[in-house]
Amino acid sequence: MGTGAADDAHERRFLALDGADGNQWHVAVELKPGAMPPEGAIIEVSRGAGSPRKSDLTIAAIAERNGGVYSNELHAIADPRSTADYRLTHKRRLEALRRARVVEREADGSWRVPDDYVQRAADFERGRSAANIRVLSFVSLEELPQAGARTLLDDALERRGNFETAPAGFGGELRGALVARRHWLIEQGLAKEEGARIVIDRKRLALMEQETVATTGARLSKQLGKAFDQPVEGERLTGIYRQSVDLPAGRFAVVERSMEFSLVPWQEALEARRGLEVSGVIKRGGITWEFGRTRGGPAL
C-alpha cells in the first residue's frame, strides 16, 4: 500500500493498493496525515451506500411528469416560487451528471433524464465518496508469519476471517504467509491441529504480545532518555501524546510524562491532540480516552 494526495488542496488522500484479488486500486480517503496507514500496511476497504441529493429527487419528479424531460422552464412551472438561483443549482447538478453520462442535454437546453436517474445519481455519489478503511495490520505482511502477537493471519487460520485471494500478486503472498504462520505457530507450541482445523493458544500469544511491547518500550527508553512504565488496568494515564509506533499487535501511542513514558493502544482521535496533554483510564485490552479541556489546548 502507498499513499498520496488526491486533490490540489491535499484535503483528501489516496491509497494505492495491491489487492488480494490480484487487481490494483486507487482509493480516495479522508484521513489526517498522522492517521494514515504506513506504506506496506494491510487494510480492508469498503464503501457505504450512496444517497441521491435532494435536487436529484426534484429533477426526477419533474422529468417523470414531463416524459423524461427536465428544463428550467418546466421547473419554474412545477414550482412557481423557486428562484433562478435555486434552479441554477439543479442545472449544475445535471452538468456534473452529464459528464458522468447519467443524463443527456438536448440542443434546446432541456435534459433527457433516464427512468433510473435517482439510482444512478446515488451510485455517482457513492463513487465520489471517500472510502471507509479498517487497518488489519499496521506492519507489512513479511513481519506477520513469525510475529509474537495476534495478527490478521490468526483470524483467517481459525476461519474468523475470509480472504478471497488470487494465486498471484499480493493474493499469492497472503496465501504463502498463512502457510508460514500456521507452521510457525505449531513449531512454537502456540497452536495445535485438530483434523483440518487449527486451534491457537491465544493466551500465550497475548503474553508474547506484552513482551514485544515491553521490548519496544526498552528500545524507546534509550532514545527518549526516559523510563518505560506500562500502566495497569484501572490506572489513569495522563501525559503528552508525542508519536505513534507500529507493531504487529497494532499501532501504539507514546504518551510521555516528565520522567517516564507509556505505550498504549492508539486511536485516530488522538491525532488532533498530538503534542498536547491527553488523559484516559486503562481498560482490559485498551484505554478509554477522555478528551476534555486540558492545559494543552481546547476541548475536542
Image (spheres, rainbow, N blue to C red):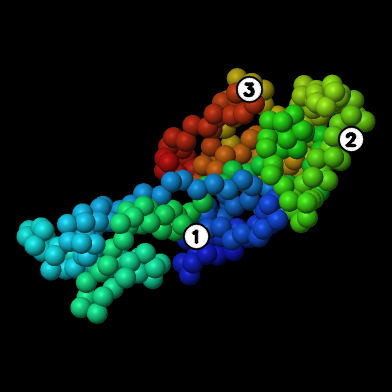
Q: CA distance from mark 1 to mark 2?
A: 41 Å
Residue sticking out furthest to the right? 187
Q: CA distance from mark 3 to mark 2?
A: 30 Å
Mark 3 vs 1, N-terminal side? 1
Q: How crowded is the residue under tag 2: few (<14 C-alpha within 10 Å), some, or many (20+)?
A: some
Q: Residue at x 46, y 45 (%)?
A: 48
Q: Secondary structure at mark 2?
A: helix
Would residue 172 be found to the left or right of residue 57 on screen?
A: right
Return the mark for residue 284.
3
Return the mark for residue 12.
1
Pick the residue in front: 255 or 13. Answer: 13
Q: Residue at x 22, y 65 (%)?
A: 69
Amino acid, disc 1: Arg
Q: Secondary structure at mark 1?
A: loop
Q: How crowded is the residue under tag 1: few (<14 C-alpha within 10 Å), some, or many (20+)?
A: some
Nearest to viewer (mark 1 / mark 2): 2
